[in-house]
Image (tube, grey):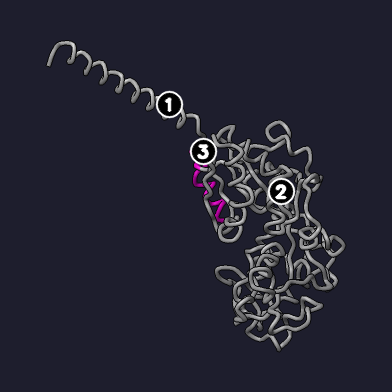
Amino acid sequence: MTHELKFGAVKRNTVKLGAAALALGLLTQAAAAESTVTLMAYSGLFQERYTKAVVEPFMKAHPDIKVTYFPVNSSAAMLGNLRAQKAAPQADVVIMDVSVSKAGTDESLFTKIDEANAPNVKDLYPTARIPDVAGVAVTFDNLVMLYNSDAVKEAPKSWMAMADKTYQGKVVIPGMPDIQGLSLVIILNKANGGTDYLKDVSKGIAAMVEIAPNIQTWEPKPEVYAPIVTGQASVGAGWNARAQVNNQTSGGKLKATIPQEGTVFQINTINLIANGPGGDAAKTFVNYALGPEAQKAFTESMFYAPTNAKAPISQDALDRTAVKFMDKVIPVDWIALAKVRDAIGEQWRRRVVPASR
């Protein structure tokens, strides 16, 4: 090989190496530019619908941010995870029940969300901002009575229908410490003449003792909706949003109603985890989740009532949410209730659970 040929070969190899190094550099820069946000939120149906309605559209709009969904079964379990990670957080954003969010706020697990780090907060309903809670409401929901339309031909008019002997062994209720059981105690306490659930829920507990002998399980798995759909159970209590989805997917096998005694709101908050690794990208995601586009998409996908007043929700979707039944909603101060929740739980364990055996 001549000197010129050798030189040419070296030159070509140098060019190739330079191009490879440039490509590697560009890939490294791209990787460095991409941020990751870890979202901790409910598993199951919520994860499936929230991913499609909010997470995926967000990543399409923000290709430089990747959102990893970390599913957890309950708000209490989420709080346990956050406590364990406090010194070195692994998640950035968490969606959880408001009362548990208050506990996390008290333990300095969260950074306050406001217009400064999430401009869409300005368009939220006033009730979406909860005093002494660092997060803000991202969804509203309400308790409903569930029933299997094959077994129950007419919508029950009272929650106490669950005490009817017709439904012996056919009632499923997520019992305390789940707030569905707690919500039912509050509703029945008021219905039976109770005046202040923060001081005395004995009348609600007594009503639950009447229902307890008909209970099939206090821990329906994976959720309360499945046994109603299959006919394994006939009636029960659950959240409206999931009930509406299950009504659709079951071809109407599961139906939901709000009995004459009324219902209560449940609030899910979105929270920024203090010192989370996602940094500003996490704030960008929170702001998007509170915006009208995301709120519209999730309400129309899963029928949670929106918290953004400017979300253009279709009338059909709104009719399936709690918005239509505001006159039946019993006001509950979930933050104040959190202080007496353990005491109510103790009454539940002593009186309600034994009555179901």
Magenta residues span 77-90
Say which of 338 and 224 sits in front: 224
> Residue 323, image x and y in percent?
81, 58
Q: Residue furthest left?
A: 1
Q: Which image quadrant is residue 258 in?
A: bottom right
> Residue 334, image x and y in percent?
73, 55
Q: Per the image, is 83 magenta?
A: yes
Q: In this view, does 165 lie above or below 200?
A: below
At horizontal 23% and vertical 15% (from top left) the residue drawn is 8
**Mark found first going from the N terminus, 3 or 2:** 3
Amino acid type for the residue under numbered disc 3: Thr
319 to the left or right of 248 = right
The residue at which mark 2 appears reads as 295
The residue at which mark 1 appears reads as 26
Say which of 23 and 184 sits in front: 23
Q: What element carries label 1?
A: helix
Amino acid type for the residue under numbered disc 2: Gln
**Mark found first going from the N terminus, 2 or 1:** 1
Say which of 322 and 130 sits in front: 322
User: Within 10 Å of the Cα at label 3, are there few (<14), some (14-19), or many (20+) other Cα atoms?
Assistant: some
Q: Per the image, is 293 magenta?
A: no
Amino acid type for the residue under numbered disc 1: Leu
Q: Is residue 115 visible?
A: yes
> Where residue 36 is drawn, which disc sits there?
3
**Mark found first going from the N terminus, 3 or 1:** 1
Q: Is residue 109 visible?
A: no
The Cα atoms of the two marked residues, 3 and 1, are separated by 19 Å
Asked whether the beta carbons under mark 3 and mark 2 sit within 8 Å of each other, the answer is no
